Amino acid sequence: MAIGSRLRGILDEMFSSADNEYDLVTELQYERGYPPTVAERIAYGDLDMRPEAIAERRKDFAPNMETFYHGGAPDINSFPGFDDRGFPRDATFVSDSKLLANTYVGQPNAMEMLGGRQRGQIYPLAVDTRDFMQTSARGQNWENMQNLDVFDPRQGIFVIDDGRPFFAKDRRSFDTDQLMEFALGEEAPGIIIDDVVDIGPNFNAARKAYRGNPDLYQDFLRLEEGSKVAAITDPTRIRSLFGAAFDPEYTGDNLLGSLAAGALGLTALMAPEESEAGVIKSFGRNLDPRFDKRVNEQLKLMENQYMIDDRGTVNPDRIALSSLEGRPIITSMADRTQAGGLLTGINDVVFESPINLQGGQGFMFENPGMVWASAQNPVNQIMAAADLFKGENPLFAPWRMAPSGGDFATMTGETMLEYAKASMTKDQKADLDEMIRGFETKGTWDKKTQRYKNKGLKVDGWKGIDDPGARELFRGLPDAVRKELMDRMDKKFRNKGGLGIGEARSAVLDPLQATALDGRIQNIGEIFRGEDIIMNSGHTSYPRGVPGQGLGYTDQDVGIFELIPDARLGEKQKLVGDPLRPTSNELRALQMKPYYGRVTEDILRGLEARGVNVNANPMATMAAITAGQELEGLMAQLPEKDTENYSYSDLLPIKRSLDPEEREGLLGGFSPAYTGVIEDMVEGLLKFKTQAEQGIYNPNAAAEFLL
């Protein structure tokens, strides 16, 4: 018996008695950065944290709230923060332009660029600009503004008139720092400086990065013509645009949190390959052309940048296919939508209410106790298939749909609506609202019935794109209505302030599936057979939940028909022609119901024969083999156990003589043992090494030498 087997019971007893209770308040406070009172209200359910509820509270935070951006260090937890010398700043400078904020991020040095790191961060902020002083630089440079008029709305007068402030009438020229100090001295919460040329030290590096994007580059060059800047002297007026809870009972300093740089901020807008994954999503040419077959639209998809506030919840472990051997497996279709974050904007368009990215494949890792979500009938079918395997919890491996498969999920259409709301002019919105109010579906022709299906359906109760209930109304529409409405918005409004259907599909796309093949598997979970269906999954598009859990992902390109080769399709119950290259008709037949089978040794050997790595992680396997070669030499040097004369301890490196006379001595017959524990540990390592060489992945062997 190896040492891990002997120790496991003792370790279990030790850890079961420890206080390992998960402290949500502590995580919210110290890991997510919420103040103690806010963390408690979230943890105890007193604060609704749904994106829609947070968006409503954000409006209440400041009815005249403005969105600004701050470019700075990658670890800012609160504003105004500290300067380069470590002294506290008097104010926070922000801009309404992400491009301008990026010029203050800081240029990466050579070593940092090689390591894929950024020196800075762009922070999207919600700012309450009520009672801010106001002025316009009229295109002048930030350090030499002359003949300014500064209006104070609290007093209703110009406190600086034509360059002559009350406290220094002879001063004719100002810089932004002086205006900030003036606002601070007047106890104003801040000052807005419109139309000022204010460019930071990162300008040249940013210019090089933007040259690859003509539209973005032209906008960037316009910074030399002037933009809006604000100096905020009251830190309670600032909240993280998408990271704050907007708790109405919290009135303290701005809420950014310890994760502001990673999850709540935006990575510096350098070249896409230099961006942190999961914060700015950009595909370039690595995107399946079927997301939008129109050439001009494909160019947009390659250039777009999608801002994601990553929750950090979808980070599964790799799972070896060999560990699935002998287990039953059930499959169903999965769209390519992303899970684990909030879509907060596209390019320069920032959404008022983020799009909650729920998946897709990643759903099983974000929702404890659930492995899948769908409508009532598909969930019933999955659970009925699971009941066929008495005494076993089947695996669940969803197969990948085509790029348009995500159109059923409301995230795609909601993205189009939210973009239109943030980007369109008043007249464009009026035209869109008129179209939706008069909208009727054309329907699709049914060859069997020789009639149109879903023809003449309307959008009842549409109040307008700016109405808070617009997205909720869209979610409640039948699938046929949603799809035709998205198509109409695409064709009529994508060049009038709207978003194309391909851009919307890309915005909610899981980056890992941008070029992935149809019919392949990705994430693997487990169904809790015999448990009740979950009646409220929390998914906006798929209301019912399948009880279970996510287990891990495979990094091998495996088709679902390779794991279920005996699946018989359609009325004729035909086998798939080529499991690795199923036709669209064969995949369509797979949509009709969940299919199931069992992962056998023959299936795994067949995968291995075509080059699939069904075993452990290659790096771990190599490490085990290398370590084993050294251990064989160590094993040869250990003395053999003298079991005829001694008994050996199970846990300690000692032995005791079997001779009764020796036991009467001073040490009771005990003496050091260089075998026993050491030998057992080495034997465990060698066992794992041997199995790795043979292509066998045995987690028990690995655990035995680790424990």
Image (cartoon, rainbow, N blue to C red):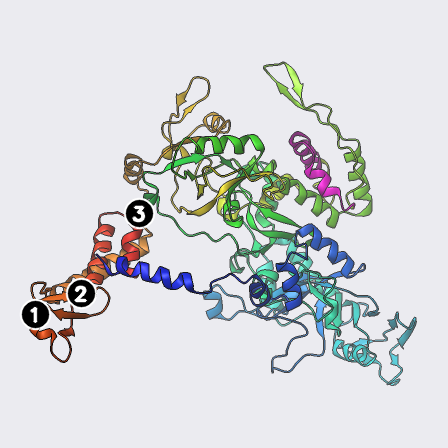
Q: Is there CB contact under 8 Å for labels 2 and 1?
A: no
Residue type, mark 1 in image: Asp
Q: Residue at x 57, y 70 (%)?
A: 75
Marks 3 and 1, how far apart at CA: 49 Å
Residue topped by disc 2: 676
Q: Nearer the viewer, mark 2 or mark 1?
A: 1
Residue 345 picture location, percent across and down: 65, 52
Residue topped by disc 3: 615
Q: Is residue 610 visible?
A: yes
Residue 192 picture location, percent across and down: 79, 69
**Residue 489 on the magenta span:** yes
Q: Nearer the viewer, mark 2 or mark 3?
A: 2
Q: Residue at x 53, y 48 (%)?
A: 367
The 10 Å Cα crowd at callout 1, few under 14, some 14 to 19, many 20 or more, is few
Q: Nearer the viewer, mark 3 or mark 1?
A: 1
Instruction: Say which quarter of the image contains residue 669.
Output: bottom left
Horizontal side of residue 691 vs 497, given as left or right: left
Instruction: Say which quarter of the image contains residue 535.
Output: top right
The 10 Å Cα crowd at callout 3, few under 14, some 14 to 19, many 20 or more, is many
Horizontal side of residue 636 vs 241, given as left or right: left
**Where, quadrant-wise, is the C terminus in this rendering?**
bottom left
**Residue 693 on the magenta span:** no
Residue topped by disc 1: 659
**Where, quadrant-wise, is the N terminus in this rendering?**
bottom left
- N-term-proximal mark, 2 vs 1: 1
Marks 2 and 1, how far apart at CA: 19 Å
Q: Is there CB contact under 8 Å for labels 2 and 3?
A: no
Marks 2 and 3, how far apart at CA: 31 Å
Residue type, mark 2 in image: Gly
Residue 385 picture location, percent across and down: 45, 31
In this picture, which residue range is highlighted in magenta?
Answer: 467-491
